[in-house]
Amino acid sequence: MTRIGKYHLALIGVAALLLLMSLVRVVTGQNDITSSGTFSAALTLAVPLALVGLGGLWAERAGVVNIGLEGMMVLGTWFAGWAGYQWGPVAALVAGLLGGALGGLLHAIATVSFGVDHIISGVAINLLGPGVTRFLSEVLYREGTAAAEAGGAITTSPPISPPAPERSLPLLSDGPDLLGKLESTHWFLLSDVAGILRGLTHNVNVLVILAVLLLPLTFYVLWRTPFGLRLRSVGENPWAAESLGVNVYRIKYIAVMISGAFAGLGGVFLVFVSTKYVEGQTQGRGFIGLAAMIFGNWRPGGLAVGAGLFGYADGLQLRSSGAITSVLLFGALLLLGYLVMQARKLMSSELEARTARQYTVMAFAALGMIVLFWLWLTVDRLPDELVNITPHVLTLLVLLVASQRLRMPKADGVTYRRGEQH
């Protein structure tokens, strides 16, 4: 008999999710739930979150808490805009990476070398990033400069020319737009799959492709190479790693600088999308990316799921505020599935093994399901203010649920001093 592994369960989960989304689309009549436009927007919005989350993953797997990702992302956006308008998208990519890595270097100096509290250092970088970039803009983009004549201002850089190229996936995008025609039929499941595939494969920014490739690459480096083993051992027990000859300080410096470079790369992507640097364009994505990393349990696969979830919620509310109400039905059905699974577990377990906590969790899930279903039946349109904060509310709810099974690296945030084990 073939053993069902976690990858089989993941595929089953994806199939069940597609069926559920298709069912909700048919019942509500909101075609934007699985439209190619929604998933194209979701991909665009998820990529910077995934890149920032990867930055947090590298740092925290080495035992350094990095809440300064937002500030490093801001540095990446400014340097990408400054270099991009002068020398093009390749220069923007390199400059953004270096700008973010510079923020990571500052964080490493403060936390690794001087033992500054990781949270305090991260907050300082989040304040320093916008301050430094505003100062540089006032110096280099003021009136009378060449940048100002090219279209720049104190709050924005001149446009990048040429813009970053876009590519479509071979086979699925060659020839006539078969996926688009199938999507327009609105058939159950088939048109949903076509819309999702079309949104994820047509006219994709090259940096999106790079970001997607970086996820499995990070997994391979951290979990399949000797360097990755050393880095993760530093995050679990740096003194044990030290006893085996690992240069803990060097590993931490490398990890935090790579962390900053990933955050800077997320900033580069924002610049590529808007074709220029704009002050405040990160809009807190550094913190949401960090939340996606925590949701993913400090692993690339879980991080990708978390970033995709937040990107989808954001993309859906941008495409159609009316479609957000369908999320209420979707949430109610998910809670119903959760209740069914929990009930089966309780039925199969011994009476003595059942706990009050299990019954309490099921009671709250049932209450949530009833409330969501009632809201879907009674509310035709959510207020715009509530629609705009939906992605952030979803972030909090997902973290609340995911926090029950999280396991952070044991030495994450611990101040390390050679030879002084705590």
Image: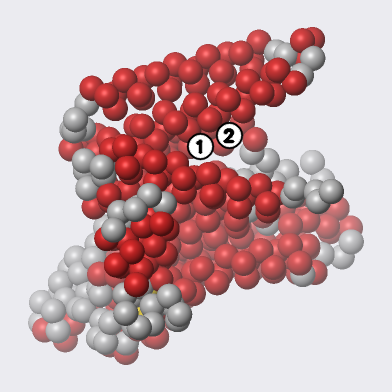
Could you say which is closer to the camera, residue 351 or residue 284? Answer: 351
In percent of width and height, residue 278 lies at: 23, 65
Q: How much space separates mark 1 and mark 2, taking CA atoms?
A: 6 Å
Residue 23 in sight here: yes
Residue, disc 1:
399
Q: Position of residue 281 (x, y in %)?
A: 28, 60
Q: Is residue 338 above or below residue 152?
A: above
Image side of residue 410 versus residue 52, left or right: right
Residue 36 lies, in percent from the top left, at 32, 61
Question: Can you say whether 324 is above or below 209 in the image?
Answer: above
Image quarter in which the C terminus is found: top right
Question: Which three-letter amino acid code belongs to the residue tagged 1?
Answer: Leu
Please state which of residues 350 and 109 is positioned toward the viewer in this rendering: 350
At a point 53% along the width and 56% down the height, the residue shown is: 304
Badge 2 amino acid: Ser
Q: Residues within 10 Å of mark 2 (few under 14, many from 20)?
A: few
Query: Disc 2 marks which residue?
Result: 403
The percent position of residue 128, horizontal first and vertical second, equals: 38, 57
Residue 135 visible in the current orientation: no
